[in-house]
Image (spheres, rainbow, N blue to C red):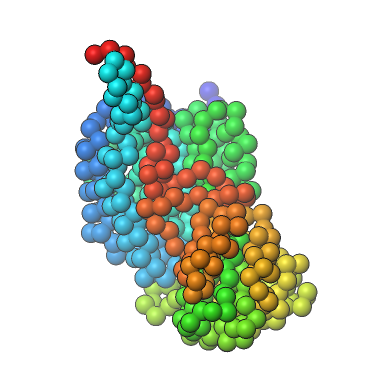
């Protein structure tokens, strides 16, 4: 019998570069065992009343609140985001969970469609079975609850693979789910990186749900295609934002949009990644934007005053440096920032570039870090043309005093989400989905609740 070699994974604090934990990775045999456990228990989990599943997940949300400080500290230690932003993430996750719990019965219960004499018709929503959730590190709570909460509510068993950069948080999620009453057999955690993900693709799951890069998402989709099961992908973005000349408070707009670009160190799928500003307000906007960025504190993420913490992944430092170098070589101007901070940890200066063009990587490829390019445009037509020039399609934002004007522009942009006078936000009440290289499928809203089910049509004659 072949004996599998045990592999171990180090968890590194990106703010200090210290090893804070060492975990044993899953093997092919251990993953097969976890899958089998899930398969064997899933039907019993589905047979529980929906109200029971709702009650357990409400307790889970309560536990998140009770242990917020501990959970936030763990999250900050492994991803590098400021402690207050970790608290915000946990609070945001609880808000989403609350919406799902309040609406689960309405959207997961059977629906009677026709009650004609002699023939009744209804729809029931059955669980997919055992799903595989390959999750992300940038918002492990927010991204995670988008998937495993509705999946569990619908009666699925879940194999949850946290990112190797947020594994400690993934284990905390499992601990609190079990504490809230979710049977341990119903929610299993896979430990490891790329190799573990490859092994998961070899197992016969009933659905795959991934959040991450376009390259990895496309690979997962190709591997899952032959299984003929649902495969949802939430991937990256190069999200554009346009500031029209009729905005009434340019300083407030600059502050709001700077936050949209740099919150969580710019490591958000829906972060503002490129900005277009009408020429009539361009100079005032850029001045106010740079002033806002320069007012932020960068440093150790455990300090309350810090807004920019460490990047999660060391490799991203080189990506950002390359984008800045490419832009400068092609004529861009660095107004602030532009380089790695000379200190222990994975820190990069919040960077603002002007005189940018679409020949530059920073305006085409996802930065996923604290770097933004701002371009002057002469009118709505030019702004629209630039905003449309991308392979991605996650979100787009327009700041203007006219809702009609914003909607007219946004409906011509092929994205899953449009923002008027706001950006970089997600709500549980409306669908979250991407287009083109930003992925497909839906989480959140009633559509997201049903994304983990298979509808069955019933034709009932007589009675």
Q: In this view, does 6 lie to the left or right of 114?
A: right
Q: Can residue 218 be seen in this view?
A: yes
Q: Residue, x 58% and y 40% (percent of image)?
A: 220
Q: Residue, x 39% and y 80% (percent of image)?
A: 305
> Residue pushed farthest front?
117
Q: Quadrant of residue 115?
A: top left
Whether 311 is drawn above or below 108: the answer is below
Residue 183 in the image: x percent, y percent?
27, 36
> Residue pushed farthest right?
330
Q: In this view, does 217 lie to the left or right of 19?
A: right
Nearest to the observer: residue 300 or residue 263: 263
Where, quadrant-wise, is the C terminus in this rendering?
A: top left
Residue 430 in the image: x percent, y percent?
41, 52
Q: Residue, x 24% and y 31% (percent of image)?
A: 48
Q: Quadrant of residue 128?
A: top left
Nearest to the observer: residue 423 or residue 59: 423
Residue 143 in the image: x percent, y percent?
43, 52
Q: Residue, x 62% and y 83% (percent of image)?
A: 280
Q: Can residue 317 be seen in this view?
A: no
Residue 117 in the image: x percent, y percent?
27, 18
């Amino acid at each position: 019998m072949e004996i599998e070699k045990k592999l171990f994974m180090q968890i590194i604090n990106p703010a200090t570069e210290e090893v804070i934990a060492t975990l044993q990775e899953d093997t092919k045999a251990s993953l097969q065992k976890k899958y089998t456990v899930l398969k064997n228990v899933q039907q019993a989990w589905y047979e529980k009343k929906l109200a029971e599943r709702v009650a357990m997940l409400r307790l889970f949300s309560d536990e998140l609140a009770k242990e917020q400080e501990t959970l936030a500290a763990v999250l900050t230690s492994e991803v590098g985001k400021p402690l207050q932003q970790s608290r915000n993430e946990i609070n945001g996750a609880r808000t989403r969970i609350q919406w799902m719990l309040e609406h689960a019965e309405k959207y997961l219960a059977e629906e009677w469609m026709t009650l004609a004499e002699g023939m009744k018709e209804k729809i029931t929503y059955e669980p997919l079975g055992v799903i595989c959730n390959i999750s992300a590190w940038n918002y492990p709570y927010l991204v995670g609850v988008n998937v495993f909460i509705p999946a569990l509510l619908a009666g699925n068993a879940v194999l949850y693979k946290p990112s190797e950069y947020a594994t400690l948080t993934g284990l905390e999620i499992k601990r609190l789910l079990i504490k809230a009453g979710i049977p341990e057999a119903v929610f299993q955690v896979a430990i490891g990186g790329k190799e573990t993900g490859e092994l998961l693709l070899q197992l016969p799951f009933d659905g795959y749900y991934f959040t991450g890069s376009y390259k990895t998402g496309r690979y997962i989709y190709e591997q899952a295609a032959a299984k003929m099961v649902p495969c949802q992908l939430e991937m990256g973005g190069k999200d554009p934002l346009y500031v029209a000349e009729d905005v009434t408070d340019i300083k407030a707009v600059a502050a709001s949009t700077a936050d949209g670009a740099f919150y969580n160190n710019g490591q958000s799928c829906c972060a503002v990644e490129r900005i277009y500003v009408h020429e009539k307000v361009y100079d005032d906007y850029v001045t106010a934007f740079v002033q806002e960025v320069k007012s932020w504190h960068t440093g150790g993420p455990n300090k309350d005053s810090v807004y920019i913490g460490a990047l999660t992944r060391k490799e991203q430092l080189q990506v950002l440096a390359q984008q800045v170098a490419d832009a400068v070589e092609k004529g861009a101007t660095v107004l602030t920032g532009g380089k790695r901070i000379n200190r222990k940890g994975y820190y990069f200066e919040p960077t603002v570039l002007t005189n940018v063009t679409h020949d530059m990587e920073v305006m085409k490829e996802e930065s996923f870090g604290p770097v933004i390019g701002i371009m002057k445009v002469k009118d709505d037509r030019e702004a629209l043309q630039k905003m449309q020039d991308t392979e991605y399609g996650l979100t787009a934002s327009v700041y203007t005093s006219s809702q009609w004007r914003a909607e007219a522009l946004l409906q011509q942009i092929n994205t899953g989400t449009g923002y008027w006078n706001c950006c970089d936000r997600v709500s549980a009440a409306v669908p979250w989905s991407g287009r083109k290289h930003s992925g497909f499928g839906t989480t959140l809203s009633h559509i997201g609740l049903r994304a983990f089910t298979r509808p069955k049509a019933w034709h009932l004659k007589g009675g």
